[in-house]
């Protein structure tokens, strides 16, 4: 047991954000905390936009616009009794801040706000935009809306990475494969055609599929996650249909059209279905329909911004006691939505990806200070000095 760390502006804000519950579509309490914190930290303006995102801006004349981005929403806490510390109280113990959203990813937003305020105090030229977006966990309405209304040159995305430099991640396609059968009485099964056997044959072919691989993102994967049969309560009925759900993670070189064609070819009588997301903002003002496909994202490795951030981090991270490491995330993020109009999105965050969505979610308090200092030093390295 280590002694409690001193309260710092970052820890204070991270704790306040954890104490404001914000499951997807109910982010207003946390968005309000974030907006008010940006006002208190001297941002020129801070507001909540039509989609419910909390934004704050610091404008200092000529220069690039850098956005620091994170999502405000969290997955639900689940059974609070399973947590070592109550998930919405912001308990600090054993050198960690505990609770839902600590690693994924309210802490990042706290670091970003404090870092941006410190950069403003030291002086810079350009624009810093801090954005806490809504609904990342359920399709990315907040980031999609943000991308339609802002055109930053560079976006730093604070998804958990233990402060490793992240260039992207595979995409995710949720596919339902409908496999036909012929209903019959289970006592006379030969009169029908059992859709579950058809599903079994399909699963064997799926497991044997050779999927695209190569590059920093590794390989595409197809993971069957659910099998249902119809009629649903037909325990004495030969099922007339089986519905297999596949969680497919694709490389950028393995686009959704090709994925669907490959999966369809495993059974020519199968019908594939990608369900639609109907996203609505909490205030009901913004509505979007999109297929349940989160595209893959990989930042260009040798882009001017990528190189500038990489070089700066090689210098900054060791000063704060961390090695420079470059890689990719294993989970999907808002990056493809944020990059949809050409911005480069690069990842760096204090949280630990293994703890995201778990009942052990927490973040090292020393990492919060390291992240704050690193974001600050990175912005100072990337933005021109005050003229
Ligand atoms: Zn996240």
Image: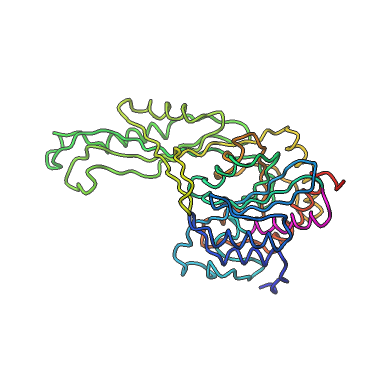
Residue 117: in magenta span: yes
Left or right: 353 as drawn, with respect to 271: right
How is this picture coloured?
rainbow
Q: Main secondary structure of the magenta part?
A: helix
291, 272: nearer the viewer: 291
The image shows residue 295, relative to residue 136, as above or below, that is above
Q: Residue at x 72, y 65 (%)?
A: 9
The quarter of the image holding the N terminus is bottom right
Left or right: 52 as drawn, with respect to 197: right
Q: Give the residue at the far right of this rendering.
A: 387
The image shows residue 152, relative to residue 47, as above or below, that is above
Instruction: Name the spot of residue 57 as percent of width and height, x first.
Output: 70, 51
Q: Residue at x 22, y 40 (%)?
A: 239
The image shows residue 135, relative to residue 241, as above or below, that is below
189, 114: nearer the viewer: 114
Instruction: Name the spot of residue 127 as percent of width and height, x first.
Output: 74, 46
Residue 36: in magenta span: no
Number of numbered discs:
0
Q: Residue at x 73, y 71 (%)?
A: 6
Instruction: Name the spot of residue 138 as percent of width and height, x first.
Output: 48, 48
Instruction: Name the spot of residue 240 as percent of width and height, x first.
Output: 22, 37
Span highlighted in magenta in the image: 107-124
Q: Residue at x 51, y 29 (%)?
A: 255
Tell me where residue 187 sits by quadrant: top left
155, 199: nearer the viewer: 155
Left or right: 74 as drawn, with respect to 244: right
């Amino acid at each position: 047991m280590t002694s409690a760390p001193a309260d710092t502006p970052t820890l204070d804000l991270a704790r306040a954000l954890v104490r404001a519950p914000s499951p997807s579509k109910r982010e207003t309490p946390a968005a309000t905390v974030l907006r008010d914190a940006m006002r208190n930290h001297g941002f020129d303006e801070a507001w909540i936009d039509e989609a419910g995102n909390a934004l704050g801006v610091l404008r200092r004349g000529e220069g690039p616009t850098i956005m620091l981005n994170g999502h405000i929403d969290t997955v639900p806490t689940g059974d609070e009794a399973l947590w070592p510390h109550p998930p919405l109280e912001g308990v600090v113990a054993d050198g960690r801040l505990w609770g839902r959203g600590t690693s994924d990813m309210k802490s990042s937003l706290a670091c970003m706000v404090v870092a941006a305020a410190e950069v403003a105090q030291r002086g810079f030229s350009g624009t810093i935009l801090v954005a806490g977006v809504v609904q990342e966990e359920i399709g990315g309405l907040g980031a999609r809306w943000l991308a339609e209304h802002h055109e930053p040159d560079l976006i730093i995305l604070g998804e958990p990475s233990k402060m490793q430099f992240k260039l992207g991640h595979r995409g995710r396609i949720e596919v339902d494969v409908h496999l036909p059968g012929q209903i019959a009485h289970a006592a006379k099964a030969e009169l029908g055609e059992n859709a579950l056997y058809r599903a079994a044959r399909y699963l064997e072919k799926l497991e044997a599929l050779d999927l695209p691989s190569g590059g920093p993102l590794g390989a595409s994967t197809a993971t069957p996650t659910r099998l249902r049969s119809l009629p649903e309560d037909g325990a004495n009925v030969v099922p007339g249909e089986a519905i297999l759900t596949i969680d497919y993670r694709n490389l950028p070189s393995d686009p959704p059209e090709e994925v669907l064609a490959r999966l369809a070819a495993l059974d020519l009588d199968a019908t594939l279905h990608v369900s639609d997301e109907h996203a609505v903002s909490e205030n009901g003002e913004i509505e979007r329909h999109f297929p349940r496909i989160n595209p893959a994202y990989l930042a260009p490795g040798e882009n001017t911004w990528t190189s500038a951030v990489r070089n700066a981090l090689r210098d900054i991270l060791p000063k704060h006691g961390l090695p420079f490491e470059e890689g990719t995330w294993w989970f999907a993020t808002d990056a493809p939505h944020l990059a949809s109009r050409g911005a480069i999105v690069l990842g760096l965050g204090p949280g630990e990806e293994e703890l995201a969505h778990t009942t052990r979610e927490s973040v090292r308090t020393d990492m919060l200070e390291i992240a704050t200092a690193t974001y600050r030093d990175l912005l100072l390295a990337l933005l021109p000095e005050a003229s």
